[in-house]
Image (cartoon, rainbow, N blue to C red):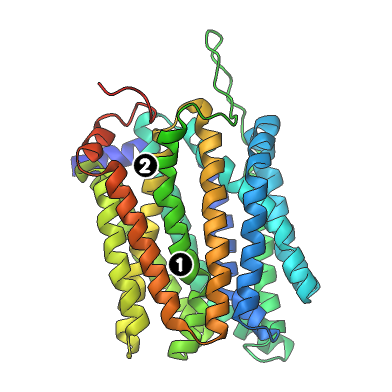
Amino acid sequence: MRNLMAYLESARGMNRNAHLFLAHTLLSGSSIALLALLYNLYITSLGYKQDMIGTVTLVACTVGVVAALPAGYALNRLGYKRALIVAVLLTGFSMVLPLMFPVSAVLIGCELFWGIGFTLLIIAGAPFMTENSTETQRAPLFSLQFVLTMLTAFVGNLVGGALPRWFGGWLGAGAESAQAYQGALYVGAALMFLSAVPFIFVRQNRPDKNAHPARPRLRIEHPVAVTKLLAPYIIGGVGAGMFVPFANVLWKTTQNVSDATIGSIFALSALVMVGAGMFAPMLSQRFGQVRVMVVFQSAAVIGLFAFGAAPFLGIALLGYLTRDVLTNLVRPIFGQFMMDHSAPAERAAVSALATMGFNFAWGVSSWVSGVWQSENQLLWVYVASAGFSVLAIGAMQYFFGGAAARRAVQTAKRPLGSPAE
C-alpha cells in the first residue's frame, strides 16, 4: 500500500510538459486504436488479400528503418516540441490519403508518410518523457502513459467495432463495406490531427546556467552494451510482426466473428491491461525488470499457441488475452529499461536504433506472414512467431538475467556500459 501511495504521489507531481504529453496520448491512442482495429479490414474490403496487408506493413517499416537516423537528426535540429508536432501531422496525413484515394499505389505510397511521421513520434516520445520527469517520477510516467493508451484503446475499440455499422447505415452501405470503414477511419484521422494541439503549449525546458545540457544526438559510446540491450527487443519484433498486424483478420477468418465482436475483444484486452499496467512497475521494482519481462513473455508464448490451436471461442479468447496483455505490459518496462540504461546524450540514438531494428524485424516478418496466410499456411505463422519470441526471451535472460538482473535493479541510475561498483 505504501508503494502504491508513493506511486500516486509521484504521478501528481509531474510537470506541465508531462501532462501535455499525456493529453496527446488520450487523442492519439484513440486514433491508433481505430486504425489498428479497422485498417486491415478496410484493405480486405477493397478486395485485397493478406499479402497486401503484409506489403503495406513492410513498406511502412522499411521507411521507418531508413527514416530512423534522419529522424534522430531532425529531433536534434527541431527540438522536441516542433518534432512532435511535425510527426503528428505527417501521421495524420498518412491516414487520410488511402481513404481519399483507395487504390493500391496510394495504399502503398501513403506508408511513406506514416513511416516517417510515426517513426519520429516514437523516437521523440520516450526521450521527451525522460527529460520531463525526475528519477522517481519516471516509472509512474511511463506506466501512466501506457495505462492511458490502454484506456483509449478500450474506448476506441469498443466504439470502433460499432462505427462501421453506424456509417454503413447512414451511407446506405453494408456494415463491412469499404464506405463504412472509410467513415470510421476518418474519425481516427481527425483524432490524430487533434492530438497535435497539446504540443503547441509545450514549454522548452530552460537549461541550467552552470551546466551543459545533453542535447538529443546520435552518438553511441558503448556499442557492445547497447547491442545487448537492443537484441531482445529486435528479435521480439520478428515474432510480433508475424501475428499482431493480422490479429483482427485472424479472428475473422479462424473464428468467424463480427467487427463488433473483434472490437469488444480488443477493448477487453485493453481494459485488462489498464488494471495490470498499474501494478507492472511495482512488480518490476519488487522482483526486477528483467525477471518480470521474462516471465510475462514466456506466458505470452503459451497464450499464442492456445489461440492458434483453440477449437472453441472461449479458449481462443483466453489465449489471445494472455498473449496480448502480457506482451504489451512488457513494452513500458522495456522502454524505461532502455532509457534508464542509456546516457542522456545517447537516448535519442538508442531510441532511434531500437525503432529501426524493431521496424525492420516487424516489416519483414509481417510480409512473410502475409504470404503464408494467403497460401493458408497458418501453422508456420504461429510456429515462427512463438520461436522468435522464445529467442528474445533467451537473449534477455542471457544478457541480463541472474546476477545481471540484480545489478540492473541496483544500478538503474547508471547508464549501461558504465563500470560496475
Across and down, in percent, residue 174 comes to 66, 92
- The kind of residue on which mark 2 rests is Pro
The C terminus lies in which quarter of the figure? top left
The N terminus lies in which quarter of the figure? top left
Q: Earlier in the sequence, mark 2 or mark 1?
A: 2
Q: Which of the 4 image quarters holds residue 102? A: bottom right
Q: Is residue 11 left or right of residue 152?
A: left
Q: Which structural element holds mark 2?
A: helix
- Can you name the residue that lies furthest to the front here? 224
Q: Residue at x 47, y 91 (%)?
A: 256
Residue hosting label 2: 140
Q: Residue at x 70, y 33 (%)?
A: 78
* Observer-nearest of 149 and 105: 105
Across and down, in percent, residue 292 comes to 26, 51
Real-space CA distance between mark 2 and mark 1, rounded to the nearest whole angstrom = 20 Å
345 versus 331 height, above or below? above
Q: Which of the 4 image quarters holds residue 341? A: top left
Q: Is residue 158 left or right of residue 175?
A: left
Residue 154 is marked as 1
Q: Which structural element holds mark 1?
A: helix
- Can you name the residue that lies furthest to the top here? 210
Number of marks: 2
